[in-house]
Image: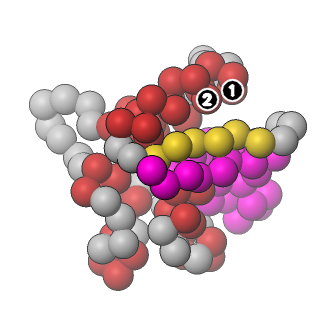
Amino acid sequence: MKTIVITRKYWGTGRLRWDVDGKQCCLGFTCRSFGVPAKDLLGYGSPANLSPNHRKKFPDWMLEKTPNYVSDVEQAMIINDSADIPMEEKEKQLKPIFAKNGIKLVFRGQP
């Protein structure tokens, strides 16, 4: 199982990576762990929107978009970006989604 460390101080919402403060969402941390440079994440909201050279590095579940149900990657984006879910609860909800796909999320540090 692959382990991805999310540093709470740099964990944000809404984009894979923000230029202003350098924060990134859970999928931004994930993209980085698959070798995508931080500068290539700027302004994107989903791994599926990155260049084909980067997309080929990801497992299929990270690129899945479905018309009839919410895929795991879409669910991760919804949870991560929700203003209504406290950060501690987001951590609890994200861990099983990633674990189901062979990734252990570890959250470290203070927000």
Which residue is disc 2 drawn over?
A: 91
Q: In the image, is 18 to the left or to the right of 96? A: right
Image marks 2 and 1: residues in contact by CB distance under 8 Å = yes
Range shown magenta = 1-27
Q: Nearer the viewer, residue 94 or 2?
A: 2
Q: Residue at x 79, y 57 (%)?
A: 21
Q: Position of residue 36 (x, y in %)?
A: 52, 74
Amino acid type, residue under disc 1 in the picture? Met
Farthest front residue in view: 1
* Residue 102: mark: none
Please indicate whether residue 55 sits to the left or right of residue 24 in the image.
left
Alpha carbon separation for disc pair 2 and 1? 6 Å
How would you rate the neighbour count of disc 1 (Cα within 10 Å): few for under 14, some for 14-19, many for 20 or more?
some
Work out whether residue 74 can be spotted. Answer: no
Residue 99 picture location, percent across and down: 43, 38
In the picture as drawn, the residue positioned furthest to the left comes out as 68
Judging by the rendered image, the residue that carries numbered circle 1 is: 87
Q: Amino acid at mark 2?
A: Glu
- Image vertical order of residue 46 relative to residue 95, above or below: below
Q: Is residue 111 left or right of residue 73?
A: right
In the image, what residue occupies the spot 67% across and 48% down?
Answer: 6
Quarter location, residue 37: bottom right
Q: Nearer the viewer, residue 57 or 37?
A: 57
